[in-house]
Each structure stands twice: as structure tokens, then as C-alpha cells.
Image (cartoon, rainbow, N blue to C red):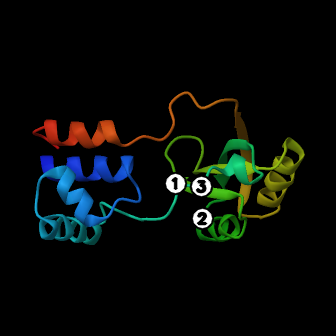
């Protein structure tokens, strides 16, 4: 659970990713030690997962974003995940319910490059079928701030 200070701290850090602890404490109106202790607690709990920069893949030569749903051969999930982990253009993989077993977020330099990536995925005997959808635009980019606010406002959170 987050309290109001945790929520405000995370929102401020996301809005100012290079902010120092002293400035963060000043903006929040609390002691620097309070901010440091809260930050350590949130990191230890796994609420904060990284401090790295967010990279715009299109700006480093990968303008194609696609989502690939994969069906996996029975009992071969580990093998499939190992194959996917070896393909750098696959950014994320989630286990899912429904017809697909895995959902992959994939970037590519071009549509022919995307086809090559999918061919590499299908070369694994662990993967029986793929269904790929290319994203045409981003309507709502990844966001967390509204959820941080709602998590504090929701007494059941």
C-alpha cells in the first residue's frame, strides 16, 4: 500500500527523473532523511524497479512496435522463454490466459525485419503458432501517475 507521501514522491520523481534527494525533500516539504528512508523502503518492497532512463526505441532505429501472441507446445514453456530471451528485439514477454500462452512486445527496424524476428521465434520447436499485430500509433503511452493517485484514494488498495 502507498500513502499520500509515497504517491507524491513517486509522481514528483517521475516528473523530474534527475532530481536529487534534497530537492525532492524540499518540493515535498519533508526532511531529506524521510525521503531517503521512503525511497529505500519502496525499492526494497519492489515498488520502484529501476532508476534507468526510458529509451525511445524509435529514436535508436526501431520504429516498428508489434505485439506477438504465441502458442507454446505443451510442456515447452521454459524452452520457448529461453529462445525469446535470446532475441534482443523482444522487449517484454508475459504469460497470458486464453488462446495464446505468451504475449511479446517486439520492436523492429522495418516490417521485413519484423518478419525475420517472427521467423526466428517460429524456428523454435517450442513455439507452435504466432499472431502478430503492428501498432500504428500510441493513443495512451505508458503511464503510472493516475494509478499512483488512485492507489492512495482507494481504501481497498
Q: Earlier in the sequence, mark 2 or mark 3?
A: 3
Q: Which mark is residue 95?
A: 1
What residue is at 71 percent from the left and 49 percent from the top? 59
Q: Are marks 2 and 3 in contact (CB under 8 Å)?
A: no
Say above or below: 66 vs 60.
Answer: above
Task: Name the mark nearer the viewer: 2 or 3.
Answer: 3
Kindly identify which residue carries mark 2.
Answer: 77
Q: Position of residue 4 (x, y in %)?
A: 13, 46
Distance Cα–Cα, label 1 vs label 2:
9 Å
- Identify the residue under disc 3: 55
Q: Is residue 59 above or below residue 80?
A: above
Left/right of residue 102 with respect to residue 43 in the rendered view? right
Label 2 crowd bin: few (<14), some (14–19), many (20+), radius 10 Å: some
Q: CA distance from mark 2 to mark 3?
A: 29 Å
Residue 32 in percent (x, y) is at: 16, 67
| Front residue of this view, candidates 47 and 126 | 47
- Of the image marks 1 and 2, the number of the one nearer the N terminus: 2
Query: On the image, which quarter does residue 138 sit in?
Result: top right
Q: Secondary structure at mark 2?
A: helix
Secondary structure of residue under mark 3: loop
Residue at image x 22%, y 36%? 150
Relative to 141, 112 lies left or right? right
Q: Nearer the viewer, residue 5 or 122?
A: 5
Q: What residue sits 86% from the left and 54% below the top? A: 116
Q: Residues within 10 Å of mark 1 (few under 14, many from 20)?
A: few
Taking depth in this image into account, of 138 and 90 the one nearest to the observer is 138
Q: Are marks 1 and 2 in contact (CB under 8 Å)?
A: yes
Q: Position of residue 71 (x, y in %)?
A: 66, 50
Q: Is residue 86 above or below residue 99?
A: below
Can residue 69 be seen here? The reply is yes
Q: Earlier in the sequence, mark 3 or mark 1?
A: 3
Amino acid at each position: 500500500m502507498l500513502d499520500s507521501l509515497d504517491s507524491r514522491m513517486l509522481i514528483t520523481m517521475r516528473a523530474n527523473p534527475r532530481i536529487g534527494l534534497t530537492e525532492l525533500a524540499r518540493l515535498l516539504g519533508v526532511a531529506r532523511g524521510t525521503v531517503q528512508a521512503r525511497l529505500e523502503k519502496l525499492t526494497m518492497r519492489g515498488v520502484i524497479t529501476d532508476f534507468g532512463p526510458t529509451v525511445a526505441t524509435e529514436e535508436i532505429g526501431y520504429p516498428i512496435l508489434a505485439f506477438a501472441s504465441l502458442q507454446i507446445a505443451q510442456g515447452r514453456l521454459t524452452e520457448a522463454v529461453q529462445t525469446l530471451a535470446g532475441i534482443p528485439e523482444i522487449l517484454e514477454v508475459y504469460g497470458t490466459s486464453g488462446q495464446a500462452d505468451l504475449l511479446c512486445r517486439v520492436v523492429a527496424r522495418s516490417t521485413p525485419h519484423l518478419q525475420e524476428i517472427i521467423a526466428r521465434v517460429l524456428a523454435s520447436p517450442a513455439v507452435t503458432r504466432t499472431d502478430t499485430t503492428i501498432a500504428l500509433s500510441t493513443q495512451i503511452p505508458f503511464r503510472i501517475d493516475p494509478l499512483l493517485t488512485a492507489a492512495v484514494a482507494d481504501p481497498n488498495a
